[in-house]
Image: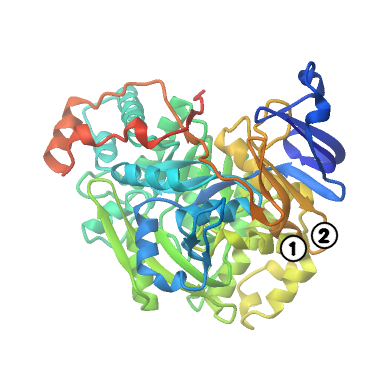
Amino acid sequence: MLKIKNGQVFDPANNIQGEVADLWIDEGKIVQPEQLQGKDLSAAREIDAQGCVVMPGGIEIHSHIAGTKVNIARNMRPEDHYSHYRPTTKTTRAGTGYTTPTTFLTGYEYVALGYTTAFEAAVSPLAARHAHEELEDTPILDNGMYTLMGNNHMIMKVLSATAQDETTRRERMKNLVTWMFDCSKGYAIKAVNPGGIEDWKWNQAGVNLDTPVKPYGVTSRQIIMGLAEASTDLGLPHGLHIHCNHLGEPDNYLTTLETMKALTGHRVHFTHQQFHAYGKAKNGKIKSAARELAEFMNSHPEFTCDAGQIVFGPATTMTADSPMQFNLHKITGNKWANTDVEMETGSGIVPMVYRPDVLINAVQWCIGLELLLLVKNPWQIMMSTDHPNAGPFTDYPRIIRMLMDADYRNAIVDSLHPDTCRYTHLRDITREYTVEEIAIITRSAPARSLGLERKGHLAPGADADIAIYKIHPDKEKMFRFPTHVLKDGLVVFEDGQIKQSFKGRRHIVDPDASRELETELREDFDKYYTVELANFPVEDAYVSRPEVIPCK
């Protein structure tokens, strides 16, 4: 039993905006005092939060923290580990890495910022077992992962079949997606460059929404619509999580807008939008199209997105979008690793350094902030650096300061490449975030988008995942150093140190549909996969603390 007293509580989900109040916690949940009748309240530990803000624990909606591509990046970047390490203590395990921290350090670094939940953004079913092993190793955080389906052989085969009516096709898709969740123990449907990765394997130049993909003849539009419909039909707690085609290319905002128009009416999360918000100047350089995307988001409340904000300094780009990564390797000359996941997807890793004196990096930096400031409803846009693609999540406090302090961010704009303002609009935006809006984009909005009803708020019955920050005029300092972090009602961070460490829960879904792979697809599996079907599903032993989030 524990009491947090005298803190300024920010709980946007319940419209509480800095009200001084006490919070009571018992058995890992937030409770009302009357629920504690018969207990000795004087025995409760008290945390005096006077002069502090009290918020729900942070929720990371999109980050690359586990799985084969993350491990490949760790191995190919020894330089990322030399100067970033944490020794073993009585409570914590050793860890290394800056842009690609090891599993233990990942958990500790998130907790040290006030985060208590994080989702791995892209895992193929074939690689799911390894991803779960790494999530098991990631301490304290509740977590989960999104299952890649946008370039999967079986998905495209079902969508391309001609001898079926619409009702049959949707039923087949619903059952196949359910089977994939059952095998991967994933949480949401992820599509990365839908159709484009498979197309690249056939040595094609790239797909638009209506480009037929070899050998199936199915288009990107058909893939995203089929997956969005399956997500809706199954009532998944989080909508289709999509990385659109043509990431990083000039004028790709047109493809992003066309994708949004196609998916209008469906619950969809568009990820790392900074990388998809590029226009094209007359000289061929990228320019900001943040206004165009923000305007569309502002008129479509069914959509959410995360920012993919650039952080200046080292980064490690990693994504299932292998053709984009190969192009990045050719453009930069930086080292490159590639993986072809049979029948399912691909991936690529390229180290990067984003520099404020490089025009394209300066423009990218501005675009992410423009999106965060131009999307009017903070419930629709969430904090992310697409870790570690645009930079490490450990720089969230600096991004928060830029959102809350226009003078500070304008001073940074003035220090960038001198042509930056020719291609961006950030210098003209005066909006400053409030503390409540920071709580929304880092906590309440991700919880709502993910369908986590016991997270992202502080009402009775909520998980007692809580972060306390000392009020400070420098918002970077304020949000970089929480005074306390609680997970399941236990104090896990205090006095700048991890106080206790344990395994978090694994969020999974269990849709109500057939879990049997139909005969035709089973025959294809036996013919083309190098893994036996019996060995394909992730066994229950790989998820020690599962929590099934209901579909509706």
- In depth, the one of 272 and 67 nearer the eye is 67
Residue kind at label 1, given as amino acid type: Lys
- Single out the residue that lies furthest toward the left: 527
Q: Residue at x 67, y 51 (%)?
A: 375
Q: Residue at x 28, y 58 (%)?
A: 339
Image coordinates of residue 390 in percent, x first then y, are: 52, 64
- Single out the residue that lies furthest toward the front: 90
Residue 302 seen anywhere in this rendered image of the structure: no
Residue 91 seen anywhere in this rendered image of the structure: yes
- Element type where label 1 sits in the image: helix
Contact flag, marks 2 and 1 (Cβ < 8 Å)? yes
The residue under label 1 is: 477
Image position of 436 with respect to 516: above or below: below
The residue under label 2 is: 472
Mark 1 burial class by Cα count in 10 Å: few <14, some 14-19, many 20+: some
Residue kind at label 2, given as amino acid type: His
Q: Residue at x 35, y 41 (%)?
A: 223
The image quarter containing residue 273 is bottom right
- Element type where label 2 sits in the image: loop
